[in-house]
């Protein structure tokens, strides 16, 4: 059958694909690769001018991953695992971005990616059972399925501070850093925030700046990275045993192979407990959380770890008052644990001043600095290290409308609701990779992404083979899963403080714990759902659609869609 433009004039769509993927980070890249292998036509729409997702935007000084390089990598292709060479234990942003570009080139993915193509809206068209996407360029796209690969940390959270727009000098947000390097030499710099990005950026900025003011509302815990170059022999040894390492990682709470200790801190003798903490501290990294099995579920055990880290901070910082301000009093690990390189030591420098804004918040920003408790702090460059509208920000930015025209952001007014973090009732054929209700940010993101992509791809293949292309989570399954996520979270220390895990960093955002803190249990649940014919999902036939000039047909003709997905 010859494709006729007139047959689609009633849709107003300029293009058609089986699957539209939003985002060209690691999730979007692998989703495209998997769907191609199954014979689906797929296209990625990306607002940036290149691949990489969060690693494209987060170019601030010191930006690097807090998961070790050899584990923060794809495992779906053995040759890819073996050929890529990492240079550091914890890869910096430029190297991770090079890796993303290497993946895109190696698998010839760019030909199906549209750059500078932000998705503004996605609307479910009931009569044809298709998603219609409106792109920033004016293009409209019709797709059977829509996969949101928009990332968990991709929308910067800009604080609502009076006078922000009046600042006369350069202003940067760590989440949207310029592509060209920023030179702070001879500059007076003000950094607002002391979260993960600030902890990475502040030591680098302090080395360059003439004067650095750090405005801190809440101090954060950090453990040392002990970053170092990776030698070829060390990499070769890891690569030789990659399968074993990956298998061990899949059994851990966060998908990282860090030799978790099954013992209880509470039940361990003090001398032995301190020795274990010291061992983890000297090793460095997030493996510290695996020192004992009860650190994140028992407040007494948690307090032991917290006091150990506090003692380390007090020893690193020379000024007792500055040390006191930098020492957290919150529950250990209820916020994202940071991995630092000389962060606390930076406050021993004579050009660095810590300003506590916990009791006297920033009053306003003025052209030449900002005001706290009536005092003006003068600087000529402003850095906002204020984090992200995490987990839901990227989805809320797009006008997503499901059955009956309901907006996703309206459904989620009291907090995100998804089944397995993958799909939301009332929004058929719409999937999210590492969405709210999945391990996502509490896990090693690359393996989590792969698990989600593989699961979604298998589901779409199953729906195609069974000629049930309309896939939708049931409201009952969604309710049960949301309740389960809350129940599991409430048995941990995570909800005990205000964090971006709960959306507490964004004014007006509902306080709901969003990620799921049990990676192995989550994977088992997903596998069980699939094994039972995708329990909790309704799989239905395509609707009968009038086709001009050819009578009634079920769905759109196979020849028009051009792939088995129709």
Image (cartoon, rainbow, N blue to C red):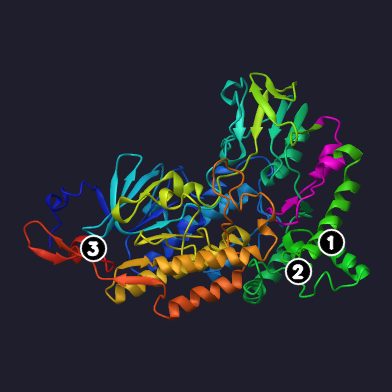
Q: Earlier in the sequence, mark 3 or mark 1?
A: 1
Q: Compared with residue 167, is residue 434 higher up or lower down, i.e. above or below?
A: below
- In three-dimensional space, the C-alpha distance between marks 1 and 2, rounded to whole angstroms, equals 11 Å
Q: Which residue is mark 3?
A: 562
Quadrant position of residue 379: top right
In this rendering, would 224 be left or right of 195?
right
What is the count of numbered marks? 3
In this rendering, would 43 be left or right of 107?
left
Q: Which residue does the image show at 20% across and 49% down from the upper left?
A: 11
Q: Which residue is mark 2?
A: 294
Q: Compared with residue 109, is residue 61 higher up or lower down, i.e. above or below?
A: above
Q: Which residue is mark 1?
A: 304
Q: Which residue does the image show at 83% across and 38% down from the upper left?
A: 347
Q: Secondary structure at mark 2?
A: loop
In this rendering, would 350 be left or right of 566?
right
**Residue placed most toward the observer, 255 or 52:** 255
**CB within 8 Å, label 3 to label 1:** no
Q: Earlier in the sequence, mark 1 or mark 2?
A: 2
**Residue placed most toward the observer, 85 or 305:** 305
Looking at the picture, how far across and down is residue 262, in whole percent?
76, 75
Q: Secondary structure at mark 1?
A: helix
- In three-dimensional space, the C-alpha distance between marks 3 and 1, rounded to whole angstroms, equals 61 Å
For this orientation, the residue located farthest to the bottom is: 532
Quadrant position of residue 195: top right
Q: Residues within 10 Å of mark 2 (few under 14, many from 20)?
A: many
Q: Which residues are magenta?
A: 323-352
């Amino acid at each position: 059958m010859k494709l006729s433009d007139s047959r689609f004039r009633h849709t107003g769509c300029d293009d058609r694909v089986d699957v539209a993927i939003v985002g060209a980070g690691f999730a979007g890249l692998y989703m495209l690769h998997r769907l191609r292998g199954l014979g689906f036509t797929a296209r990625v729409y990306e607002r940036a001018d290149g691949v990489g997702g969060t690693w494209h935007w987060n170019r601030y000084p010191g930006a690097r991953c807090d998961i070790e390089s050899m584990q923060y990598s794809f495992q779906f292709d053995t040759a890819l695992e073996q050929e890529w060479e990492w240079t550091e234990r914890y890869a910096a942003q430029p190297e991770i971005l090079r890796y993303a570009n290497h993946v895109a080139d190696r698998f010839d993915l760019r030909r199906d990616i549209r750059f500078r193509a932000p998705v503004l809206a996605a609307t479910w068209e009931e009569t044809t059972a298709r998603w219609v996407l409106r792109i920033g360029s004016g293009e409209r796209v019709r797709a059977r399925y829509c996969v949101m690969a928009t990332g968990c940390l991709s929308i910067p959270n800009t604080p609502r501070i009076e006078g922000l727009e009046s600042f006369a000098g350069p202003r940067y947000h760590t989440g949207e850093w310029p592509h060209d390097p920023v030179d702070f030499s001879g500059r007076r710099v003000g950094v607002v925030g002391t979260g993960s990005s600030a902890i990475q950026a502040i030591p680098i900025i302090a080395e360059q700046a003439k004067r650095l003011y750090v405005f801190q509302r809440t101090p954060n815990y950090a453990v040392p990275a002990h970053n170092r170059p990776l030698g070829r022999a060390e990499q070769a040894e890891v690569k030789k045993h990659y399968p074993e390492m990956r298998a061990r990682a899949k059994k851990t709470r966060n998908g990282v192979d860090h030799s978790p200790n099954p013992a209880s801190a509470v039940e361990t003798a003090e001398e032995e407990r301190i020795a274990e903490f010291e061992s983890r501290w000297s090793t460095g990294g997030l493996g510290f959380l695996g020192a004992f099995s009860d650190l994140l579920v028992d407040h007494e055990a948690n307090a032991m770890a917290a006091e150990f880290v506090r003692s380390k901070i007090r020893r690193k910082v020379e000024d007792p008052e500055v040390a006191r301000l930098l020492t957290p009093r919150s529950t250990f690990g209820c916020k994202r644990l940071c991995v630092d390189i000389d962060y606390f030591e930076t406050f021993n420098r004579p050009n660095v001043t810590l300003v506590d804004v916990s009791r006297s918040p920033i009053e306003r920003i003025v052209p030449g600095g900002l005001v706290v408790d009536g005092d003006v702090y003068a600087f000529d460059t402003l850095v906002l290290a204020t984090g992200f509208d995490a987990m839901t920000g990227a989805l809320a930015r797009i006008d997503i409308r499901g059955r009956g025209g309901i907006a996703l952001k309206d459904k989620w007014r009291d907090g995100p609701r998804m089944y397995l973090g993958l799909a939301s009732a009332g929004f058929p054929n719409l999937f999210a990779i590492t969405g709210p209700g999945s391990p996502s940010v509490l896990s090693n993101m690359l393996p989590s992404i792969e698990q989600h992509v593989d699961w979604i791809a298998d589901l779409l293949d199953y729906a195609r083979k069974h000629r049930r292309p309309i896939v939708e989570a049931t409201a009952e399954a969604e309710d049960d899963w949301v309740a389960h996520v809350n129940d599991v979270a409430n048995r941990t220390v995570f909800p005990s403080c205000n964090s971006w895990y709960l959306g507490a960093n964004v004014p007006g955002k509902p306080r709901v714990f969003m990620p799921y803190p049990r990676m192995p249990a989550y994977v088992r649940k997903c596998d069980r759902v699939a094994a039972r014919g995708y329990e909790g999902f309704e799989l239905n036939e395509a609707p009968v659609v009038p086709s001009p000039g050819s009578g009634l047909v079920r769905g759109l003709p196979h020849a028009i869609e051009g792939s088995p997905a129709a």
